[in-house]
Image (cartoon, rainbow, N blue to C red):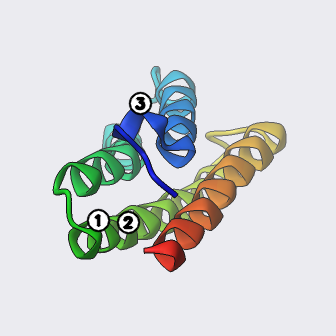
C-alpha cells in the first residue's frame, strides 16, 4: 500500500470526520475539562497519522500509528463516560463509537502492512 500524502489515508479522513463530530457535539459543554480532553484525544488520532507519515520511515510511521490507536481507545473510553453522564445520546454514542472502532481497525491494518 503506497500513499503519496497523508491526506490519501482513509483512516486520517475518518479521524477528521470523528473530530468534527466530537467538536460539534461538545461545543456547548459546560464541563470544560472533559470536553477539552475528548477533543484533544480525537485530534491526536489524525495528527499522529499525519506526523508519522511525514517522518518518511515505516518504523516511525508505525510508532505514530500506535499512538493514534491509543488515542482511539481514549476517545472510546471517554464516550462511555459521556454516555453515563448524559453528555451524549445513545445514538450519538453508537455513531461515534462505531467510527472510532473503524479507525482503530484501519490503523491495525496499516501497522500490519508496515
- Eye-nearest disc, 1 or 2: 1
Mark sitting earlier along the chain (3/2): 3
Q: CA–CA distance between discs 1 and 2? A: 6 Å
Q: Position of residue 67 (x, y in %)?
A: 33, 68
Drawn side of residue 97 relative to residue 32, left or right: right
Which residue is the site of mark 1? 61
Q: Is the residue under label 2 in contact with that under label 1 (CB below 8 Å)?
A: yes
Q: Is 28 positioned to the left or the right of 91 in the image?
A: left
Binning the other alpha carbons within 10 Å of mark 3 as few (below 14), some (14 to 19) or many (20 upward) gives few
Residue positioned most to the right: 91
**Relative to the observer, which residue lies in front, 85 or 67?**
67
Q: Which residue is mark 2?
A: 65
In depth, the one of 35 and 6 nearer the eye is: 6
Inter-mark Cα distance, 3 to 2? 32 Å
Query: Image point 30% across, 45% down: which residue?
Result: 50
Number of marks present in the image shown = 3
Seen in the picture, residue 59 relative to 41 is either above or below; the reply is: below
User: Counting other residues with Cα less than 10 Å from the Cα at mark 1, is it few (<14), some (14-19), or many (20 or more)?
Assistant: many
On the image, numbered disc 3 is attached to which residue?
Answer: 30
Residue positioned most to the left: 55
User: Relative to 16, is 68 above or below?
Assistant: below
Q: Residue 40's spot in the image, x, y percent?
A: 32, 45
Secondary structure of the residue carrying numbered label 1: helix
Q: Quick one: 81 or 4, which is closer to the camera?
A: 4
Secondary structure found at label 2 = helix
Amino acid at each position: 500500500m503506497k500513499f503519496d500524502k497523508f491526506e490519501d489515508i482513509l483512516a486520517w479522513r475518518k479521524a477528521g470526520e470523528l473530530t468534527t463530530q466530537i467538536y460539534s457535539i461538545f461545543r456547548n459543554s459546560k464541563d470544560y475539562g472533559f470536553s477539552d480532553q475528548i477533543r484533544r484525544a480525537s485530534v491526536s488520532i489524525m495528527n499522529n497519522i499525519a506526523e508519522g507519515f511525514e517522518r518518511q520511515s515505516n518504523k516511525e510511521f508505525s510508532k505514530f500509528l500506535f499512538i493514534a490507536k491509543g488515542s482511539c481507545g481514549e476517545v472510546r473510553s471517554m464516550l462511555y463516560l459521556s454516555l453515563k453522564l448524559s453528555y451524549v445520546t445513545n445514538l450519538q454514542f453508537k455513531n461515534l463509537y462505531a467510527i472510532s472502532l473503524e479507525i482503530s481497525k484501519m490503523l491495525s491494518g496499516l501497522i500490519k502492512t508496515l
